[in-house]
Amino acid sequence: MVAIDVDLLTGRYVATRFDDRSAVEWPPHPARLFSAFVATAKEHGDLPEGVARALEWLEDQGPPHVFASEAEARAGADHYVAENTTRVLADWSAAEENEAEALAALKEAERAGDAKVIRRARSAVNRARKTLDQHIAKAIADDGKANASACAAAREMLPEHRGKQPRPAPSVTPHEPRIRYLWPDAWPDGSTRQALDTLVRSLVRLGHSSTLVACRVVEPEREVKTPAGLHAWVPADSGEERLRTVAPGQLERLERAYARHQGVEPRVLPAIHQPYAHAGCKRATPLPSSVFGEWLVLREIAPERGRRLGLRLTRTEDATRALRAALLERAGDLPPGVLSGRAPDGAPLDRSHAAFLALADVGSRHASGAVLGFAIVLPRKIASEDRHTLLRAVGQLERNGLSIVLSRDSRLVLERVVDGDPRITLDPATWTRPARHWATVTPIALDQNPGNLLARDPAAAEAAAARAEDIVARACEHIGLPRPNWVQVMRRSLFDAAPEAQRFMPYPRSGPGPKRVCVHAEICFEEPVPGPLVLGAGRYFGVGLCRGSRRHED
């Protein structure tokens, strides 16, 4: 076996949780350690061959045991930094991107050989280059003319006049300032061990740049033992913690991600979310959590010829049912209940199973309301075999092209998000971040009929609303959350661009069974609860998806 010891030289660790930037990550996730190794190795250019082999060997070893002590959390104050982008440089950058897209379109046209399309593509390239030249000239002009526009643009480039972004810096002070990562079944050969040792000794920080560390490779006893003063987090089929770990191909994924964001654009660390069980460590009372856990995110991309479909949110049920059907086709003759929602005898499953969510652009003045992608959300308690079967079905769908047919003339083309996506709609943290107040993006299909919510008699309408609010409160309890302090049902969502509840009715759109009343709702809990909140009879098909709301937050 082999282990890596990390000593915290300042006695504290600073890093935000991936799903809550106001909270600290503890213990440091294995994927963060691996990413730090890659960043360290690439500081001086391309990876040496031996170091690259050592990293590829490490990513093949599976999730490690993690040993760390108890720690005291400290929220810390937000730090404010100047934004890197300004209007002047943003225009220049956008023009460069337009030129690159025009050149790519020209190359595609030349490969196709259509003379008419080639002429149009060349005209587009010329227009893009002319626009780019104008922005460059504007940015570097020195013509002695100090008009108001030029002065404003120049002033904007000074750091003190740029917008300021808050950067939270939560930290923990562990009782023992060291962490051990141990791979019980890892046995590196001589050259791998030497390259790994060189890499590990070069690491100087982990997480935030203020977390200075010293690392070393150790070979502990052949029996796995918990070091004195530390507690163990062990990989498990199910557990109270999910740590981000790595899998084969992680080095390549990190390199692709960096090629996209260049250390400037927003990014999400590619990782595998592995359940861990911990033993012997006293921890704060955990937040209540819903029955849903790991996310697989798919984003819509343009087909080879054509444009994105721009699916409307009202077609959530159609699209999510089509996505599930496509996965069922590739799951074999006996698909797992976690995917089908059915027991082997065909009866409805008596436990939670995978939910399919449509993720739409809502919540801002300029939101389009269009579905940007989808999420397959696994239940928190899922057997490893069922999880692997579901992932294999997703992989087969990817190999054949993630194309979902909705009708004869509408088709969704998707790709799996493995390197993160800068759009907040496709960031799981947007939907899982703990909050006291939540509001629906897609309305809740009520499990029971509350009565006539639109009755002319005010008393009858008020009684129906009270029953609907009680049904929503019980739906929260049904997915493992505490009963809310209060619920308010309404026809419209609190989020801009989310359609009215009536436009989702009837639910379900076809098939036997009762047709459900759909309502939007605002929900308030006593304490923050983490998402995802997907409530009601349509929760497995994305009807009843909520998002944290700051409307009443202090």
Image (spheres, rainbow, N blue to C red):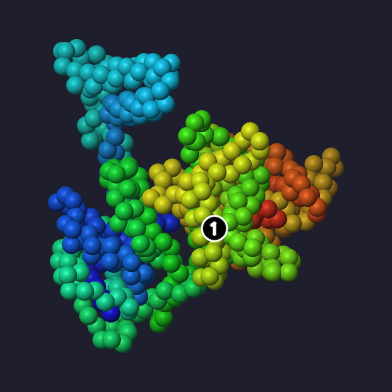
What is the quadrant of residue 186 in the picture? bottom left
- Rendering quarter of residue 173: bottom left
Q: Residue at x 62, y 55 (%)?
A: 329
Residue 10 spot, x, y in % from top left: 20, 66
The kind of residue on which mark 1 rests is Ala
**Residue at the (34%, 58%) spot, across then down:** 249
Image quadrant of residue 513? bottom right
Please give the name of the residue rendered at 27% of the width and 38% of the height, measured from the top-left corner.
84
Give left or right: position of 199 versus 86.
left
Residue 431 showing in the rendered view: no
Image quadrant containing the N terminus: bottom left
Q: Residues within 10 Å of mark 1 (few under 14, many from 20)?
A: many
Lateral position of residue 165 relative to residue 513, left or right: left
- Residue 41 percent across, percent down from the top left: 19, 57
- The residue nearer to you, when weighing 271 against 74, is 271
Residue 387, percent from left and from top: 52, 65
Residue 357 seen: yes
Residue at mark 1: 393
In this view, 418 is above or below 413: below
Assign a secondary structure to mark 1.
Answer: helix
